[in-house]
Structure formats: C-alpha cells, structure tokens
Amino acid sequence: MDTLSSIGLLGAFLGGLVSFFSPCTLPLLPGYLSVVTGRSAGKADRKLEALLLSLCFVVGFTLVFLILGLGASSLSQLLRGYRQELNWITGSAVIVLGVFMTGLLNLPVFQRTLQFTPRLQGGSPWSATVFGVSFAVGWTPCIGPILGAILMATSNVARAQDGMVYLGMYSAGLALPFLGSTLCLNLFQRHRRLLGRWSAYTRPVAGTILILMGIAIASGTMTRLSSIMVDLFPSLATLG
C-alpha cells in the first residue's frame, strides 16, 4: 500500500482505540461483557470460554465494518470522475463531525443512540456474534462520528478493497482492548473510575483531529500531509 494508506491505517487503528475509551462506550463495557459471555467474564475458571465468546462478538462487528468499508470505497470509485467535489463534500462532513465531537456544536441528530437489541440468551457463539452485529449497526454519539469520518476518508483510497482494510484496522483498534478487558475484567473494575476520568478527554482530542483531517481531505492536501508525516516518522512508511 502507498504512503497515504499507511497513514490511513494508523489513523483508523487509533480511531478504534478512541472509540473504545470514549465516555459512552467504556462505562457500558461490564454490561456488554456480561451479556456476551453469559456472565463468564471475570471468573478465573472460565476465562477461555469468555475469551472465545468475546472473539465471536468481535467477528460480528468486524464483518459489518468490513462490508461498510467495501461499500463506501466502492461508491467513491464510481464517483472518481468527481473526485474534487467528493473531497469537498466528505471533507466538510468530517469537519462537522469533528466540531460535534469537541462539544462546540450541538447536533441533536448525532446525540441519539440507535441500537438494535436482539432477544437472545447470551453465552453461545451464535448469540455473541449477533450481539457484535447489533453493536456495529447501532449508532452512538461517541462511535458514530469516528466511524463516519473513517468511512468518508475512504473516498481517497486507490482501490475499492482498501476501504475494507481501513475498517479492518478500525475494528482491530476497537477489538484489542475489548479482548484484553475480557481477560482482565476484575482489574478493569478496580481502575474504572480512573479510566472514566481519562476518557472524558478523548472526545475533544478526537474532534480536533477529525477537524484537521476534514480540512486536509477538503483541500486535497492529505497526500502532502502524509509525506510530511513520513518524513518526520519514517517508520510509518513500513505500515502499508
């Protein structure tokens, strides 16, 4: 993959981490784990069972994210003859999402939480996977804007399948701490208040990054920015 893709991969992965540690995801983690694993999370003698069920949950939301990534990048390929106009539209949308994330703009449409809750008994691979799909198709004020921004950023990819790679990295950033928390739920519970205070800063920081990202997309300087980043941090060139 080219330099732009390398920067995009890193950004998508960090977006997944920010989504996990955001103030409207982190407090719900114990509840998610309890339902998905059938209350096996946190029990020393059932850690492997909890981890396997959490992996099924991850597979569920990853499948949805990959499909979204392929769809968004495929659409951008169909509109490649209008690349400049597409950059203006997607860049402007990312800027709006970023301003919303900082808290400077109140948009009620983004404040709504839309969740599909399947009526399934947790504790089985099938139900865990369905819960993962439900998690991915729902919209929350913390995850939605970041996911939306990454989807819009796929308008700059060279190939349709690159959108799947970006969303795969976003999913990885979301999945790794989730799986880690499954194994260390008791430790998470002890430090939950500290993590909660820290997570309050993730939204404005993420919002600022989205604003800068939107400006770069709209102005067509994303490639130039990528080159500068690789000059400053040469190791980024090895990510793609």
Image (spheres, grey):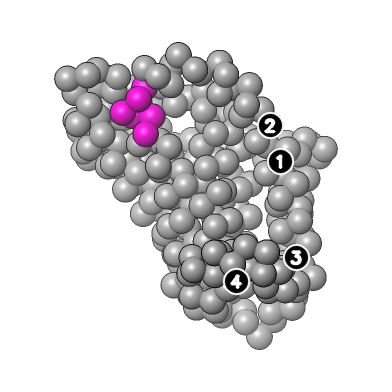
What residue range appears in magenta? 180-185
- Along the viewing direction, whichever of 146 and 85 lies nearer the viewer: 146
Q: Label 2 to label 4, Cα distance in Å?
A: 28 Å
Q: Residues within 10 Å of mark 4 (few under 14, many from 20)?
A: many
Q: Label 2 to label 1, Cα distance in Å?
A: 6 Å
Which of marks 1 and 3 precedes in the sequence? 1
Q: Amino acid at mark 1?
A: Val
Q: Which residue is mark 2?
A: 201
Which of marks 3 and 4 precedes in the sequence? 4
Tell me which residue sits at (48%, 65%) in the image.
Answer: 239
Q: Residue furthest right?
A: 104
Tell me which residue sits at (24%, 17%) in the image.
Answer: 43
Q: Is residue 221 magenta?
A: no
Q: Residues within 10 Å of mark 2 (few under 14, many from 20)?
A: some
Secondary element at tag 3: helix
Q: Which residue is mark 1?
A: 205
Q: Is residue 182 magenta?
A: yes
Callout count: 4
Q: Amino acid at mark 4?
A: Leu
Secondary element at tag 2: loop
Tell me which residue sits at (67%, 40%) in the image.
Answer: 110
C-beta proximity under 8 Å, tags 2 and 1: yes
Q: Residues within 10 Å of mark 1 (few under 14, many from 20)?
A: some
The disc at residue 4 is 4
Q: Amino acid at mark 3?
A: Ala
C-beta proximity under 8 Å, tags 2 and 4: no
Secondary element at tag 1: helix
C-beta proximity under 8 Å, tags 1 and 4: no
C-beta proximity under 8 Å, tags 4 and 3: no
Q: Which residue is mark 3?
A: 216
Q: Residues within 10 Å of mark 3 (few under 14, many from 20)?
A: some
Which of marks 4 and 2 precedes in the sequence? 4
